[in-house]
Image (cartoon, rainbow, N blue to C red):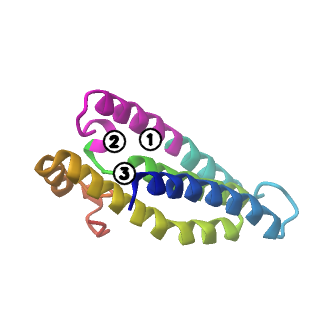
């Protein structure tokens, strides 16, 4: 696939995801904006805060790696290959919990396979750029979940 076409799909996917999440708020039938369940609300807020921290750390390490023309293997990248996507999943789950709208989770479930395919495309590009060095990195780390979560097969 041409690089420009990939970029357009990449941007479009995020825009469509955001629109779907926004529209899902109008499908949900509830009396309050946020959930009234304090456990769901606090868990959702915790998820959102964790996702923001992961995204900031991952972005910092990715920026440093790109500037150094190397593979990001520090910080969150030491444990997973796609911490930014993982943070998006965690953020979306957190938002779904605080709004407690099932439609948020449906949107997330629909988009997860699309992001997985996008990650696979990114990995093909990384192999073209870095060859065996990236393949070695793939063997040491998992895509979305750290190795200590070995019961989840996501290679």
* Secondary structure type for disc 2: helix
Q: Which mark is residue 38?
A: none
Label 1 secondary element:
helix
Query: Within 10 Å of the Cα at label 3, are there few (<14), some (14-19), or many (20+) other Cα atoms?
Result: many
Farthest residue to the right: give it.
31
The reply to whether residue 28 is in sight is no
**Left or right: where 74 falls relative to 55:** left
Quadrant location of residue 38? Answer: bottom right
- Residue 92 percent coordinates (x, y): 59, 56
Q: Earlier in the sequence, mark 1 or mark 2?
A: 1
Q: Quadrant of the C terminus?
A: bottom left
Q: Which residue is mark 2?
A: 76
The answer to which of 119 and 42 lies nearer the viewer is 119
Label 1 to label 2, Cα distance in Å? 7 Å
Residue drawn at 74 percent across, 65 percent down = 24
Label annotation for residue 54: 1
| Residues at discs 1 and 3 in contact (Cβ within 8 Å) | no
Percent position of residue 69, x then y: 25, 32
The residue stretch that appears in magenta: 51-77
Asked if marks 1 and 2 touch (Cβ < 8 Å), the reply is yes
Q: Nearer the viewer, mark 1 or mark 3?
A: 3
Q: Which residue is mark 3?
A: 82
Badge nearest the viewer, 3 or 2: 3
Can residue 33 be found in the magenta stretch?
no
Quarter placement of the N terminus: bottom left
Residue 149 x/y as whole percent: 30, 61
């Amino acid at each position: 696939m041409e690089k420009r076409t990939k970029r357009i799909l990449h941007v479009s996917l995020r825009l469509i995801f955001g629109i779907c999440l926004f529209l899902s708020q109008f499908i949900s039938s509830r009396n309050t904006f946020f959930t009234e369940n304090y456990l769901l609300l606090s868990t959702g807020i915790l998820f959102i805060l964790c996702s923001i921290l992961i995204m900031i750390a991952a972005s910092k390490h990715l920026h440093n790696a790109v500037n150094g023309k190397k593979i990001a293997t520090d910080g969150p990248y030491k444990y997973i290959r796609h911490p930014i996507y993982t943070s998006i999943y965690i953020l979306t789950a957190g938002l779904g919990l605080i709004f407690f709208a099932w439609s948020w989770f449906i949107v997330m479930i629909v988009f997860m396979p699309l992001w997985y395919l996008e990650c696979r495309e990114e990995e093909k590009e990384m192999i073209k750029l870095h060859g065996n060095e990236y393949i070695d990195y793939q063997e040491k780390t998992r895509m979305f979940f750290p190795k200590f979560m070995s019961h989840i097969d996501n290679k």
